[in-house]
Amino acid sequence: MNTFFKQAQPVWPEGMETTKNIHVEFFADFQCLENQLVELHVTGSTIYRVMLNGQFVHHGPARGPHGFYRVDELDLSDRVQVGENDLSIEVAGYNCNSYAYPNQPSFCQAELRVGGDVVAATGGSGFSGAVLSSRIQHVERYGYQRPFLEAYRLPGVREEMPLAVQVDKPLLPRHVVLPDYDVVTAGERIDAGSVEVVEREVDRSEFGWMIDANYSVLESFHPTQFEVDVLQLHQSCTCSQGSGASVNRYELWDLGINLTGFVRCTVSCQEPIRLMVLFDEVLTEGDIDLTRNDCLSLVYFELQPGNHALESLEPYTGRYLKVVVLDGEAEVSELGMREYVNPEASDIVLESPDPDLNRLFEAGRQTFRQNAVDIYMDCPGRERAGWLCDSFFTGRVEPLLCGSSRVERSFIENYTLPDSFARLPKGMLPMCYPSDSSDGRYIPQWSLWLILEAEEYLQRTGDNELIELLQPRIETLLAFFKPYENECGLLERLPSWNFVEWSKANTLLMDINYPTNMLYAKALDVAGKLYDNEQWCAQSAALHESIREQSFNGTYFVDNAVRDLIGIPILSGESTEVCQYYAFFFGTASPDEFSNLWNFLLSEAGPNRSETNPLHPANAFIGYYLRMELLSLHGEVAQLLQEMKEFFLPMVDATGTLWEHRDTRASCNHGFASYLCVLLDRHRHEITTPA
């Protein structure tokens, strides 16, 4: 039963619900008396921005699973003015594959109530709809994982079109709190100069996803269809430092730390100009390099003479903003970002006498609040994707910083509701969700982390109802793995994208991968306890024993075994650091039973490992995160804190957030890294008590 709307129905311009990359505005004028209750109920696909009397109100919706849509219920009472008001809902319909959103037909369903009475409802009266010609439709994607970049010709016109009622949409509550939208203005101009524009043939070779075949797989426009080739324009610009340029110039500004939100500025021009606002988390040789993170991190505008208040519709991430003005003179002011962050993670601090630890905690808090608005994300810039495994660690952070697990509830619920997942084999779960993967690729190991997260979510919340909803998913998931069990019960030759971590370990996956089986054993035990299945628990114990017998060579656990020509599994002889962490983290090994190995890991391994260490080194995720947890659980607090400072403080100095890797070759704002807050808080007594 629809309890969210009294009258509104889902609508869209007739025949355009699957049109790619269009921007539609739904608008209504209404009257309001003093002290009246004014409410807007709204949902849609793919994303929308709500404006009231020309002022920003909200970005939505919170993401739901395929076939379900979360409804925003907004109280506008404090924002309206007595008399006439103008409400606008701008909806972008993408209709392409991405990691950030499900690929679903576009629609808007909105209902405005004043004093409890419906005064405007889509599918009824009060709202009009228009395609906004200002959005340049046929453009490149922002990146492989996200839909189209934003490009505009302003001012545009409202092209009013007849609206068609769409099929009914199953609706869900938002669940999570409304975001914070504080405006931050860039505080320091760090570079400026002139721009020489010499048209060059575009070079797409440094963007691995810009391959002809990918455009159709991603359901995007091919370069031959582009109205504006923004990459070609960018590559045609050469910036030279210096002052005095009034035409074809650039300015580079610093926000102080990495922030996530809507890029914005005010522009006044007396003649037509083109303008690009570029952004990135770090500078490469003193400038923004679009190839660093494999994204077209910019917003493009073609502006007619006049005053323009510009703001992106999509949220982005960056510390640095670069404005490039072409073809004419323009005054650019109020350059900055409207934040889009979780408001519940706004106050907590560590209060340690060690300022470095306080800075690490604050960097973790910043990282979390930008990565946990409606779901847990890997990063708020390049992907905005809800990855399993990452979510296990982020899930531990939310109750500490927010006092609840609201975002985690939505994240897990999204996995429970769809009947099935397109392009995936029966039982398997998407590696990131809600999303639409173009090729049906999945990470079998990551699906098992959802079982581990579910156990801890139940411990944090007592929410048995959600865990019961998840049970069929867990049962069919474990059934998926059954055919891949060998004669010893160990998983062997799993399909699709096998993943342990970004290190040598990812080359040692066949035939029998022991880190994978350590994870499998733990997941079976957890599932058995969650759902009172003794068989799963017994299978888990037997697996741990088989792994110890087969993988441990007397010194280290070996990563994998490969079958010889007559089918006998032979150990590869290759041992990675992360394999040892898997063993201790998942209970295959303990420091007491494997004391020599444990002591070796303490003294010779880790981010500052011995040069003579024969183990292939681990990477940050997930190897060093498992290591930090193990150091914490087994009382090695001093070593833990020292390694954390040495590993993470350079990140804090550079961006104020925590990174995907130790270097800047990928995301510099990664949600799982906020787990540092949990480790620091766990040892708050040791940290804050003087020796």
Image (spheres, rainbow, N blue to C red):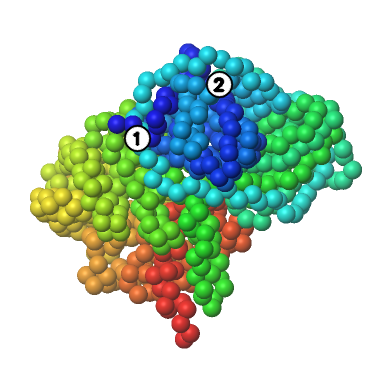
Image point 64% across, 49% down: which residue?
Answer: 183
Image coordinates for residue 236, horizontal then vertical, percent: 74, 30
Image coordinates for residue 11, horizontal then vertical, percent: 46, 21
Image point 48% across, 85% down: which residue?
Answer: 690
Image point 62% across, 17% down: which residue?
Answer: 159
* Side of 452 relative to 398 (left or right): left
Of helix, strand and loop, which one carries label 1?
Answer: loop
Image coordinates for residue 478, horizontal then vertical, percent: 20, 42
Whether 646 is drawn above or below 112: the answer is below
Q: What residue type is labelled 1?
A: Thr
Whether 604 is drawn above or below 151: the answer is below
Q: What residue type is labelled 2?
A: Gly
Crowd class of label 2 (few under 14; some 14 to 19; many from 20; radius 10 Å): many
Of helix, strand and loop, which one carries label 2?
Answer: strand
Q: Can residue 254 be seen in this view?
A: yes
Crowd class of label 1 (few under 14; some 14 to 19; many from 20; radius 10 Å): few
* Side of 465 relative to 615 (left or right): left
Mark identifier at residue 3: 1
Q: Is residue 51 visible?
A: no
Q: Which residue lies furthest to the right in this view?
A: 244
Q: In which quadrant of the rendered image does the N terminus lie?
A: top left
In front: label 2 or label 1: 1
* Side of 509 relative to 267 (left or right): left
Q: Residue furthest bottom?
A: 691
CB atoms at circles 2 and 1 under 8 Å apart?
no
Quote the CA–CA distance across marks 2 and 1.
Answer: 24 Å
Image coordinates for residue 84, horizontal then vertical, percent: 63, 33
> Toward the viewer: 487 or 585?
585
Residue under label 2: 129
> Toward the viewer: 576 or 453?
453
Of the image marks 2 and 1, the number of the one nearer the N terminus: 1
Image point 30% across, 68% down: which residue?
Answer: 597
